[in-house]
Amino acid sequence: MRETTALLQIKNLRKHYGAVEVLKGVDLSLNKSEVVSIIGSSGSGKTTLLRCVNLLEEFQQGDIILDGEIIGYQSATGGERHRLKDRELSRQRSMTGMVFQSFNLFPHLDAAGNVMLGLRKVRGMGKAEAREIAEKWLDRVGLLPRRDNFPSQLSGGQQQRVAIARALAMNPKLVLLDEITSALDPELVQEVLMTVKSIADDGATLLLVTHEMRFARDVSSRVVFMEQGRIVEDDTPEEIFNRPKNERLASFLKSTRN
Amino acid sequence: MGYSLHFDAVWSNFDSLMSGLVIGLVMALISLIAGTVIGLLGAFISRGSVAGRWLVGIYVMLIRNLPLLVIVLLLYFALPQLGIRLDKYKSFICALSLYSGAYLIEVFRGGLSSVPVGQVEAARAIGLTRIQTNLYVVMPIMFRNVLPSLSNTFIGIFKDSSIAAAIAIPELTFEARRINTNTFRVVETWLIVSSLYVVTCSVMSFILQRIERRFPKF
Amino acid sequence: MDAFLNQLWIARWPLVDGLLTTLQISLAAIVIGTIIGVLVGVQLTYGSFVSRIPFRLYVEIMRGTPVLVSVLAAFYIPSVMGLSLTAKMAGILALSFFAGAHIAELTRGSLQSIPVGQIEAGRSIGLTFRQIVVNVLFPQALRSALPPWINTGVELIKGSSLLSLIGVAELLLNTQEVIGRNFMAIQFYVFSGCIYLVINIALDQAARTFDRR
């Protein structure tokens, strides 16, 4: 029974930069179609955790298992861990989609080109097929009319929606969203959150880091609170926001309300 | 093949290589000073008026797009036709000064525009005249900002001094070519000469960086 | 003036030949130099510390050595090594290595000025590093590298005049030979200087146009 095993399992993940421990043994699992928000103060390791799942960061201990496959490293049963080769990492990365805080759209490609690049080069699609899928996803985020615009001609909110389309067009098993509204002007936040909400409603599996508490509460099936490289609380939004058990969580929530 | 390295013949000529190096450095230094005068004048003139900007712009465009060797030959071989006779040292230093002047104009122009308008306004606001503002506020800020480019230009000028070999000034490259033909120790000669240039440039850039660090950054 | 025009007409073919040789040398050097420069530049930017050392050494040596010294070395050394290179080939070799070092540095500069987020975005959609370099980094680097690359072309055309000192019959050497026959030094130096100016100013303007976009 495939459904009973989690889509993503993170087991005892540890990461340090030199002497600084950023992740001190994180365990987290995620089922298909779940939407999990990670909250916590800056420096708590939540973004690093997300980047580890996308294999943008190396980590020193623990396993990340995506759809039954240990990713990033040759499975380490006792012996030494080896980072996989670039080609293999690329294949595994294409199973997850990532949306960045600073959009990171390719400035030399128009909106459609941004979405098509991965379809063409990673999925090996022909131009026509890639364009069809790209246009479908641009339409999905409400930007089909802007398909020929370059990133510099789009607002921040529109750029971020193209970035969401770029990630989703690859048909990833899991989408990672890293503080995707933090770099946006306040009036543009809503359009992006609405887009995320609608893809969540469609059954996408999302793991997101956010500072938007109301949004986390609205959209998530579970909320995880991180503090100093550890997961301190992992519960339903209802419990996290209304009955925080941990003192630190309570004071964190209080501070965000101001 | 069958070439084996023998450095003796080159080492025995080491004195002439060193004197060649010194000649190159001295010519570069004089040209740097003259070029800096041209550069500063050019930068301020091109700020002064539209006509000035045009004139300076044409000078920079002409010099930067001509091979240095052509300028050297023009001054040394062609000017006598007009009755102006310079010896080879004078004509080469003139050519190198004119050449580096064009590059330094651009350096100083960039430096001037890097001085924030607010600084100039503040200076005028406390009652400094235009000249005083330039002297006490604009120039010091500009000099600190252009110091790295100035260092690079100096190293460039030193390398360009090798072209003096073309009119038989006995600087390093000329001496190298002489040793090359006299001793046939071809590989050794060029290995040593190239190393001398590289080492001199590295030492210069090290010293100039030290000097840069002495001045506070703004 | 009539005398000059008369002499110019007599000297037309050597001058045209010289100009063509100058252009041919510069073109060959920019092509070879670009290939060397891009390969070395990518290594310098993304290679490991150890694999960068030989390339860094190459760039530093070329940047510390006057072009004339490289030209003379390329002219004299191959013959004692048992290689027969014509003076022209030796000159092209030297100018190519010179251009290669310059282009390597400007490739590195352009690549390094691209935000890391671009590489990460490429990775996150599953592109391999090679694909990222080709599809994401190069197109962006091209924009900032194009103007200085054209200026390297200007430097090469100027530098090619140094080949007159090893007897390559390019524009400057042929000009000198013409002057040797008619003694009109000013006229012909200025004339050839103008030819250099026209070509280089055209290139320079092209670079500025690209820079503004």
Image (cartoon, grey):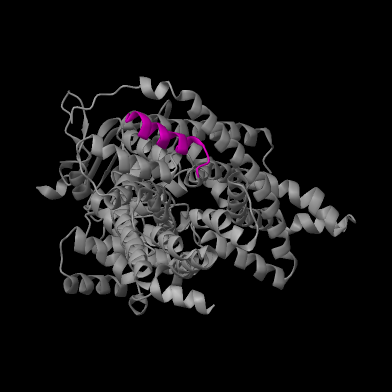
Determine whether, in the image, residue B191 is placed left or right of residue B81: left
> Of residues B146 and A139, which is closer to you in this image?
B146
Q: Which residues are magenta?
A: B168-185
Q: Quadrant of the N terminus of chain B?
A: top left
Classify A255 as above or below B202: below
User: Residue B196 versus residue A165: which sits nearer the camera?
Assistant: B196
Quadrant assignment, res C174: bottom left
Q: Residue at x 63, y 40 (%)?
A: B29
**Quarter the C terminus of chain B occupies:** top right
Q: Residue furthest left?
A: A1
Residue A25: % across, % down: 33, 31
Residue displayed at 58% across by 46% down:
B88
Residue C91 belongs to the span the image colors magenta:
no
Residue C39, percent from left and from top: 29, 48
The x and y percentages for residue C30 are 33, 57
- Describe residue C13's horizontal placement relative to residue A186 as left or right: left
Q: Is residue B161 above or below residue C192?
A: above
Can residue B47 be seen? Answer: yes
Judged left or right of residue C170, residue C5 is right
**C40 versus B65 height, above or below:** above
Where is residue A250? Give x, y as percent.
Answer: 51, 41
Question: Is residue B115 something that shows in the picture?
Answer: no
State whether the magenta stretch is mostly helix, strand or loop: helix
Q: Residue at x 21, y 54 (%)?
A: A173
Q: Is residue B170 magenta?
A: yes
**How many numbered marks have been drawn onto this rendered protein structure?**
0
